[in-house]
Amino acid sequence: MSKLKHILILDPIAFAGGSKVSTKHVLAQLEDKDVRVSVLTADAKSWRQTQAYVRHLVMPEKLERAEQGLAYFARHLLIAMQLLWFRLFIGRIDTALAASGPGVDLGLYLAKPLLGYRLVQMVHGPVATSRTIGRCLLHANHVFYLESTRDSLCAALEATGNTGEVSAYPHFQTFTNGLPKSTWPSACQHDYAVVFWAASLLKWKGLDTLMQALSMLHPSQRSETHVCFIRPEQTTLAVSQAPQPVSKVFWHEAPDDLDAIRSRANIFVSTSTKEPFGLSILEAMAAGMCVIIPQDGAYWDTQLTHGVNCLKYPPNDIDALAHSLLEAQDDMRSLTRIGKAAGVISQQYRAEFCFANICEALAPQVGSRISAMTRNEVQG
């Protein structure tokens, strides 16, 4: 029997989010294969339903929010020390997955020379222009990034005095997020209009925009609305308030039955501007929902067409969003048609295709077998 490949994941973010969901979708492709996974995390509850061996990351309160200066480096040096201690209990590590961004995953880079693992970096959002981050990107074995983060990566690389064009580095490669078959969203209902919103309470996610748009509508015009939210912890960023007293709006904090709540709705609203990808938009599309998105040049704005497979509104335009909500809920036939068209597009984002190269980088022999099985499935 072949020896199990051992993958280490560092997760220093104290609340759930899109990058964490994406990471678990990658790992879903490796379940029941010849791999084992160990996670050092600040958010153990996010990993309960995985096969990973999980241990809690300890961080003094004074360092939890350090984003610059000596305190920032002290924070990541402490993380690196905990990684070295973790290694004593979990054994040899073949590959480390830096799942958020080099500015967050710095501890993995600090421990890499001592622990000797290969390091795979995923980049889900723009990175800061920093020599430290640029050097990390150069020292990773593989960097998989969303296309929307390219400019920030180029700036970070330029800060090191090297060329800033990512195409000059063979270990850089783009990816798109995908959804596993095992957790593919349930189909939504098309009997009557119900609105659905899901994101964290970070201000830039735009919950306040939705609430203001709903408040513009008379309660008799307002559809039943379900808001599923994650309350950020250990963040210096501005946060919206929830719940808010708006009639016909139902609030769900980090619900375990998110898929069931989504399946009872059929209009998905995105209010964040310049979303690097928008995993919740993809999930809504896969459920056959009519998605309403800002026309902001972000990923889904470039992939979807207004009136065909989505509805669009000018970003942060409360009047326009209120009009889009009325347009969607007043014509169930059109709502259903747009949702089904979005569902067809979502089929292109199956995790076994989207994450094949990342799986290959994490566990080369195992990843190759997964890619071959996927090809055979398609050809069959």
Image (cartoon, grey):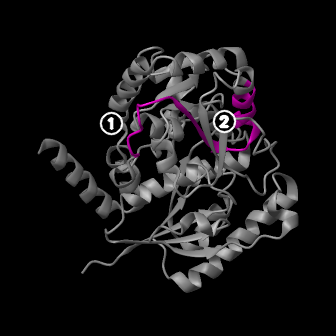
Q: Is residue 201 magenta?
A: yes
Say whether residue 195 is left or right of residue 361: right
Residue at (61%, 20%) from the top-left corner?
296
Give the vertical position of 263 relative to 370 (above or below).
above
**Where residue 202 sits in the image (x, y, percent)?**
73, 42
Which quadrant is the C terminus positioned in?
Answer: top left
Q: Is residue 135 left or right of residue 116?
A: right
Q: Is residue 18 above or below residue 36?
A: above
For the point 32% across and 30% down, the residue is 344
Residue 102 located left or right of residue 339: right
Residue 373 picture location, percent across and down = 21, 54
Counting other residues with Cα less than 10 Å from the Cα at mark 1, is it few (<14), some (14-19), or many (20 or more)? some
- Callout 2, which amino acid? Lys
Q: Find residue 347 and name its label.
A: 1
Of the numbered discs in the image, which one, if any, rests on residue 234? none
Under mark 1, the amino acid is Gln
Residue 248, label in figure: 2
**Segment tinted magenta in the rendering:** 185-212
Does the rendering let one see residue 45?
yes
Magenta stretch encompasses residue 258: no
Residue 246 position in % (x across, y down): 74, 35
| Mark 1 element type | helix
Instruction: Name the secondary structure under disc 2.
Output: loop
Residue at the spot 41% in from the left edge and 22% down from the top edge: 338
